[in-house]
Amino acid sequence: MRKLFNRNRKLYHYIILIFLVISFNFFLPRLLPGNPLVNIMGEDISLLTMEEREAVIERYNLNDSIFKQYTTYLRNLVTLNWGTSYSKKQPISSVLWAAAPWTLLLAFSNLVISTLIGIYLGTKAGLKRRKKEDVYLLSGISFISSMPSFWLGMIFISVFSVNLGWFPIYGGYSMWQNYTGISKVIDVLRHLFLPLSTLVILSISNIFLPMRYALIEVMGEDFVFMAKAKGIPQSIIRYKYIVRNALLPVFTVFMLRVGYIFSGSVVIETVFAYPGLGRIMYDAISTRDYPLIQYSFLLISLMVILSNYITDLLYPLIDPRVVNQHENT
Amino acid sequence: SSVDTLTISIHTDENTLTPFTYVRGYPGIEVARLVFDSLFTLDANNQVIPWMVEEYSVDENFQVYELTLRDDLKWHDGEKVTTEDVKFAFEYALTQNSSRWRRIASEIEEMEILDERNIIITLENSNLDFISNGLADFMIYPKHIYDGVEDATLVEETVGSGMYQLLEYRSEQYYKFKAVEDYFMGTPKVKNITMPIINDSGANFQALRAGEIAATTAQLAPELVETFEGNRNINIKSGPGFGSTLLQFNTEEYPFNDSKFRQAIAYAIDIDELIERITLGYADKGNLGFYHPNSPYGRQTSTHSYNIEKSNELLDMLGFTEKNAQGIRLDAEGTPLEFELLVNGGSAPRSRTAEIIISQLMDVGIKVNIVALEGNTLDDRVWPGFDVSHGRNYEMSIWGWSGPMQLNSDALIRLFASDFAKGNLNIGGYNNDVFDDLAEKFAKTLNLQDRDDLIQEMMEVIEGEVPFLTLYYGETIMAYDSTKYDGWVMQDGMGIINKFSFLDLDTAVAQEGVVSTEVEEVSNNQSSSFPWWVVLVLIIPATLILKRRKNREDDEEVI
Amino acid sequence: MDETVIKIENLYKTFHKNKIGQEVHAVDGVELQIKEGDVYGLIGASGSGKTTILKLMFNLEKPDSGKIFFKGQEMISSSWKERRKMQQRMGLVLQDPYNSLCPSMTVKEILAEPLMMQNKIKNSKEALDKIIDILHRIELDPEKYIDRYPHQLSGGERQRIALGRALMIEPYFLALDEPTSMLDVEVKEEVLRLIKKMAKDLNITILLITHDLSMAASICNYIGVMKEGKLIEEGIVETIINEPREDYTKKLLLASQNLEEYWSLF
Amino acid sequence: MKTLKNLCKSEEKLGLIGIALLVFFLIVALLAPTIAPFDPYERVGKSFDTPSSIHLLGTNDIGQDIFSEIIYGTRFSLSLALLASFIAIVLGVLIGVISGYFQGVWESFFMRLTDFILIIPFLPLVIIISAYFSGSFKNLALVIGLTAWPSTARIIRSQVMRIRSKDYILNLKAMGGRDSYILKRHILREVLPIIVYRFMMMANSAILIEASLSFLGLGSPTIKSWGTILYYAQVRNAFLTDAWVWWILPPGICISLLSVAFLFSGYYVESRLNPKV
Amino acid sequence: MEPILKVEELKVWYGEKCKGDIIKGVSFDLNLGETLGIRGRSGSGKSTIAWAVMGMMSHLKGGMEGSILLDGKNIGNLTEKEYKKVRWKEIAIVPQAAMNSFHPMMKIKDSIGEILKIHCKITDKKQMQDKCEELMEIAHLDKKVLSYYPHKMSGGMKQRAAIAMALACEPKLLILDEATTGLDVLTEAEVLRVVKNLQRRNNMSILLISHDPRLVEVLCDKTIYIEEGVIVDHSTYHEADLLEAKAV
Ligand SMILES: Nc1ncnc2c1ncn2[C@@H]1O[C@H](COP(=O)(O)OP(=O)(O)OP(=O)(O)O)[C@@H](O)[C@H]1O
Ligand SMILES: Nc1ncnc2c1ncn2[C@@H]1O[C@H](COP(=O)(O)OP(=O)(O)OP(=O)(O)O)[C@@H](O)[C@H]1O
Ligand SMILES: [Mg+2]
Ligand SMILES: [Mg+2]
């Protein structure tokens, strides 16, 4: 009973947060200087008479009171009637859904690969504490993670695409070749390779560092020492005792990154002209495409909230110590 | 020579490419013109030629236009193009948001359909340029698709009567076109066109160089001309561009309200250096009277000159003789001449222009601080609500007007008339009685020659006043892979993406009017001198780091 | 002489969750009185709410309901200014000697801190004299200890420093929470002796919390027994030791005096 | 069992490297006018010049000396990193300490605020904020500082909560110690190493963020920072010519080195404050 | 009687040898079925002796010298691998920090099961369950506790679970390192009773480390006093004990 109550309280907390985010996403673009008129009416806007302009503004409800616009927005949000983008002149949902899979493909594979590599290397470095290998790994990974992402991406393009010609330069797949079946998959993978490797290289440290620190902490815990005293074999201690416990903080980091899955690769998407959400969002802001800003932001924020929520739900299952974690950890 | 498939990258996403969904004037409209035709069209030299129209006549008042459509016009879905479509297109445009079409359609008073091919269009007021500015621009779209649709942007099908049919569009990804075999001007030379959308201009050039695409809508950056000239497959065409970069003054603001002061600034700016540095010479020097010399209304004479003595002289004359410790001139009240220059931070050439200008102005004792703003924010300060009557909130700004403005005879009126209803582009708040009188006369003129004379007269007025200083018009430089396709035609001020690049016309584009910088084949290996050591530098530490040391005993001890 | 220093009425405190996720009635309707000069021993198994009472007294936790009087003045409802004034005459030594000293301060700084906090330092000479005096009192050689850091002290020494800090402000009332829990017999003896002496010399009222009945017996004159948040038995020390009423008290007594006999109960 | 002392070798080594690098950059920044052969704002050569003995790294698109630009860029990047992380730290510490120490209304208000800012994705938020302001140095630092504080606030808050419930703090409170006294003398003093550590981390990301912002055209194109050098190199297509070797590699390497310097110094502080690690 | 544990001239140090010994030559022996008490001030080296006997010095970044004879066999110079077989089958320990010595993400059942699997080669599920339940009974814990995670248990329960775990392989020697500090008197009495019963049942030898004179008095057959790493004359302690007794 108590448990249920607590869970509900959490949910209630999230609902408030979602409401805040929804409202914020409405007001934020409207507070920006400038307006979306050019993108609605085209570049010859100055030629229109005042009445003609008013008519268009009317049609887009742009001079309703902000409160009225807000309620309309809420209504449309709930009824899933998201409307059309000012600049793309297409339904918002189709704009977002066309781009989301690509971002997901890129970001998700990055998430999986960099997490695995990060855990692997973090374990290596942590277990080899004080050894040369640890120093190499720590300094090497810190160094590559300190490179500007676009810079690394562009160098990759320069070296591997332009000079060596191993990989395509831009895009998600070869658009004018009608590949099907397995060759289509290969084509997509070839396009994915460079942006993905750039992202992976830059995000390894996000997992590597927590993993390494957690490992070192766990290694000093009494129960690990005790396991040795109990005569438990090395490999069991290493994986069942040390690594498994060290994975807990890594899980939190992992879920945090799940939340940023839609927004984490804006720069790389731009560099590699990858057809993802990042570019769309960026353009939406510069063209003051209110609905598109609203909903792409919403998508992103909801993803973060969702992943937080999932973390809250999963954590007690993963770490039995957490019965119902309060916010103060 | 006909080509089966051509890949031309497009550097922005232009949606479904219908007259109501394209995004930008360039490349959106230019590409859309391959799909949609207009009654008239502009040829490579920007001369009007009839296109969908077979015969036409205009009354002496430039008010009644009698048009006869060609007989062989067909929509892509097989329906015949009739005068019903034409009438509908103009009427329907009035109900839609697009300012471009609305402006043209709103000039029409009535249309009378005589039969399927003949129609009479009557304007509310006489307009000498209705064909070139209106009918040659206005795209005709099918009634059977748009009839009854309230919001034209929601029409997803792209059905035109142009030479190419849009087969497929994927948002942010690509367009695929197929040639219309029985096009009335002949079968297009390229059967299929694929247009991948590559937002990053650098990536477009990379792709071009790597041989992945045949051409791109993106203009080649001047600094790449040399590199690309070295590539034996790539040809470069360049021609005058009509888009301008200018230094805009807020003429309502002291001391910019004084034409002497504006002149002083103009004299202090060394435009040649700007052109040399920023465009590497690929630009034409700004004309004091707005129009580009190659535009129908341009004059060769009125160029600007750099004269620092004159500038100093003028400033001294205005009373700004005192200087403070930093060498900045002081005005009568002792306030230093220190101003803000707004610039679009997202545009590198413009921010560089600003950077050079401020150092040049410093030489005459005027201190200017650059304020880099995001594009839309800049618009909001210079041109709030895109309505000049809303006022303005700046002192100086780097600004620019797009190419098609050069083709409008009334551009000067719109830029400088103090009555904001006419001078709807008068973002500097310029006010001059002499000019206004000329503008009044201009509106009443019905004679082409008189009108051209008036334009010249107005330009002379403006030249002495410098309400803004046009710095340069960047040249249009287009690069293409000549091994893939070589039939490109350069349209003045526009580029190579146009109807004439894909059609075999003997008459319309007899001469290109543009010097094509076909480069002799130079075997140039320099560009492939890739610094391999860089790869080594990157790879060696990586392998060092990843080198594993297997030592089980070690592990035992550590944990 | 017979004035009441601390009086607790109907005190309740519930914690919403412990580790297993249940509500805990840590203090469940406690009534208690301590007279001036008394050494009051509070005993009970762990988790019976002893420390919680103490925290409530010192405003480190908020009670659900109830009243606490210090020298006749209600504390909980009084303004924070008044309360601070009262608290400035109350000393507290917490359970864990390893955490109750700031690790980055020397003994001198730690002892000077109460004075500094209450802006009582008139000049440093006077303060130093006082510190040395207190160090003598808690039987630590000032010269040897005055510049040490807590990590250079043994558990017993720490507990004594904590005690010394509480004494710096000349309290009327001193609350000691298991002041000898971590000590070996010798040191424990020393500390107990000190407490006794202080109670007598300075006429300080003391509340001593422990779960060791034998120790309580040796220095207290009143004893209260706590079980699950309730004060189940209270009285003069002899009475409690010799003729305990509650079974629970008996068990406690037995377990702490004679293990074998206690086991034989099963 | 827990005495795992003497374990912080690797971090200390790296820390020394980091500090050495920081000092190096600091010296370069301070002595920029003497070290740099040219004034980076002067157009001293022809545009797009290749490296030569006069212009070690060639010239940029308007003929400014790239080597001098990079040297002056150190000033900007370093001071931006310091200022931005200073703003973030001040905010983070203030909010972290207040919400960690005083419970109640303030706490929940500030924690909701941090939650909220953490939920808004970082880069888009920066894009929006910088659309409001012009990209001057001050504003850039402000933008980065204003968006980077929540994680610090969280960490500081949890630390403060940990310290606050320590016995010796309780003791002081019980003896009627003022909050201001406890905050000043104990809490702040104890979180100081964490503050330093977070400062280093924040400086590291500030440098990278500035570079990314400049790359996206949201930076300040008129300021000589490494990010804007890269921005111009990129928009003037240095990647399509050989120029990338001298126009793109060096500033990128400088960015990595400076941010890694902060990172390593951070490790050092961390290893000092947490003997277990 | 042949001593089950015979320690001779044991020297133990942490870190480098040159930094000085913590245990400076200690000798004692313990007979089968008896209990040896070790007392001494905090920090005198009691736990250190226990860990030395467990052969854990290398894991504590230290080393030892001298001989430790378990049942006549010198275990002082075994390699890590050989020692792994001795640990828990022959000697088991309930450490001072018993509360923290459970894997936080393993149920008690799994922790004990793991030991049974590794040291007693019990792999059958049913057999393992039976054995676990038996151990719970010995330690006076409810069977339910088997499926608890350590964080759900109180200190006393954990101490008892630790004892159950120590007894899983019925070792010859059990080391109790202040196994009851931090427990209240009642729980303490409970825990010790369990141990005492077991000793009687299994004829097990116990090394009891404590500073509580009551316990040592009740439980031990013999007591040694450690001070700064050496065994000392215990007269001073008697005095203290007397004082204590007097106080009660
Ligand atoms: N901050 C808290 N949150 C939740 N529960 C608490 C808190 N503080 C104490 N408790 C619970 O309140 C009960 C009483 O605790 P208290 O510390 O007063 O016991 P005690 O008598 O001092 O025990 P010990 O002798 O072990 O010190 C315990 O069950 C404890 O778990
Ligand atoms: N891992 C270690 N590294 C270095 N020194 C240690 C280590 N563990 C203990 N010591 C030191 O060795 C000495 C003896 O410690 P030990 O833990 O054996 O004491 P103890 O007699 O068990 O004390 P207590 O009664 O407090 O448990 C102490 O001075 C301690 O500081
Ligand atoms: Mg307590
Ligand atoms: Mg010990």
Image: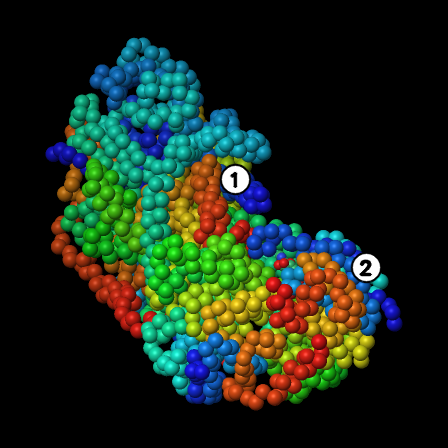
**Element type at marker 1?**
helix
Q: Quadrant of residue B72?
A: top left
Question: Residue at horizontal 46%, vertical 38%?
Answer: A295
Q: Nearer the viewer, mark 2 or mark 1?
A: 2
**Element type at marker 2?**
strand
What amino acid is at disc 2?
Glu
Q: Nearer the viewer, residue A282 or D154?
A: D154
Question: Residue at horizontal 56%, vertical 69%?
Answer: E192
Seen in the picture, residue C110 relative to B16 is either above or below; the reply is: below
Residue contact at pointers 2 and 1, CB within 8 angstroms: no
Q: Is mark 1 within 8 Å of ligand 1?
A: no
Q: What number of labels is visible?
A: 2
Instruction: Answer few, some or many: residues within 10 Å of disc 2's Cα (few below 14, many 20 plus, some between 14 and 19).
Output: some
Q: Nearer the viewer, residue C114 or A249?
A: A249
Q: Measuring from the top left, give residue B302's x and y in whole percent.
A: 36, 43
Q: Residue furthest right?
A: C1
Q: Is residue B337 left or right of residue B472?
A: right
Q: Measuring from the top left, give residue A129's x and y in whole percent.
A: 38, 71
Q: Residue furthest top?
A: B114
Task: Quickly name the residue at label 2.
Answer: C74
Q: Is residue D106 left or right of residue D121?
A: right
Seen in the picture, residue E6 relative to D46 is either above or below; the reply is: below
